[in-house]
Image: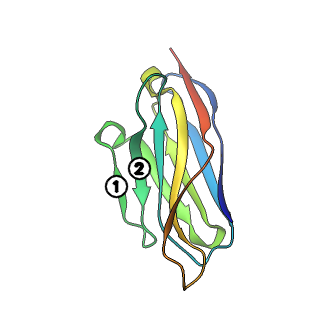
């Protein structure tokens, strides 16, 4: 079994910053991409950022220049530094990763339980 556990969510004022963390644990042989998605109330889940095992990053246009994704491969952990937060970015933020449990297995997509980020105006 593999699981992702997010942390770092909370309440922040508009213009403020938060850093989210997501640690993968369990039977892990290899992790391909790790990323973040978010879901605001009444809206569909949307892509925020991802990072490959080699460190290549990709961001949603709405967060470019304000959010930074990084990962520590030794700790199987991905981070999301969020700066200049806006009230409309209030959402549950979900961690996502493609994980291979053994060299015999294919990569499976795993989701965390989500962490709430609330940005007050």
Residue 45 position, x and y percent, is 43, 37
Residue 38 position, x and y percent, is 47, 38
Q: In this picture, is 40 found above or below 35? A: above
The image quadrant that residue 51 belongs to is bottom left
Q: Residue at x 50, y 14 (%)?
A: 121
Q: Which residue is mark 2?
A: 49
Q: In this picture, is 47 found above or below 69? A: above
Q: Residue at x 62, y 53 (%)?
A: 22
CB of mark 2 within 8 Å of CB of mark 1?
A: yes
> Seen from this angle, which residue lies furthest bottom?
103
Q: Secondary structure at mark 1?
A: strand
Residue 85 position, x and y percent, is 47, 29
Q: Residue at x 54, y 79 (%)?
A: 105
The image quadrant that residue 3 belongs to is bottom right
Q: Camera-side residue: 103 or 96? A: 103
Decide: few, some or many residues near mark 2? Use Cα within 10 Å; few <14, some 14-19, many ≥20: many
Q: Camera-side residue: 84 or 112? A: 112
Q: Quadrant of the N terminus?
A: bottom right
Decide: few, some or many residues near mark 1? Use Cα within 10 Å; few <14, some 14-19, many ≥20: some
Q: Secondary structure at mark 2?
A: strand
Q: Which residue is mark 1?
A: 58
Q: In this picture, is 111 found above or below 13? A: below
Q: Earlier in the sequence, mark 2 or mark 1?
A: 2
């Amino acid at each position: 079994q593999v699981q992702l556990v997010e942390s770092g969510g909370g309440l922040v004022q508009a213009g403020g910053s938060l850093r989210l963390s997501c640690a993968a644990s369990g039977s892990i042989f290899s992790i391909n991409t790790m990323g973040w998605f978010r879901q605001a109330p009444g809206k569909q889940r949307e892509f925020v950022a991802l990072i490959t095992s080699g460190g290549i990053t990709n961001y949603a246009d709405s967060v470019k220049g304000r959010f930074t994704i990084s990962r520590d491969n030794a700790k199987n952990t991905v981070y999301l530094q969020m700066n200049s937060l806006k009230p409309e970015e209030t959402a549950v933020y979900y961690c996502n990763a493609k994980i291979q449990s053994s060299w015999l297995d294919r990569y499976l997509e795993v989701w965390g339980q989500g962490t709430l980020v609330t940005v007050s105006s």
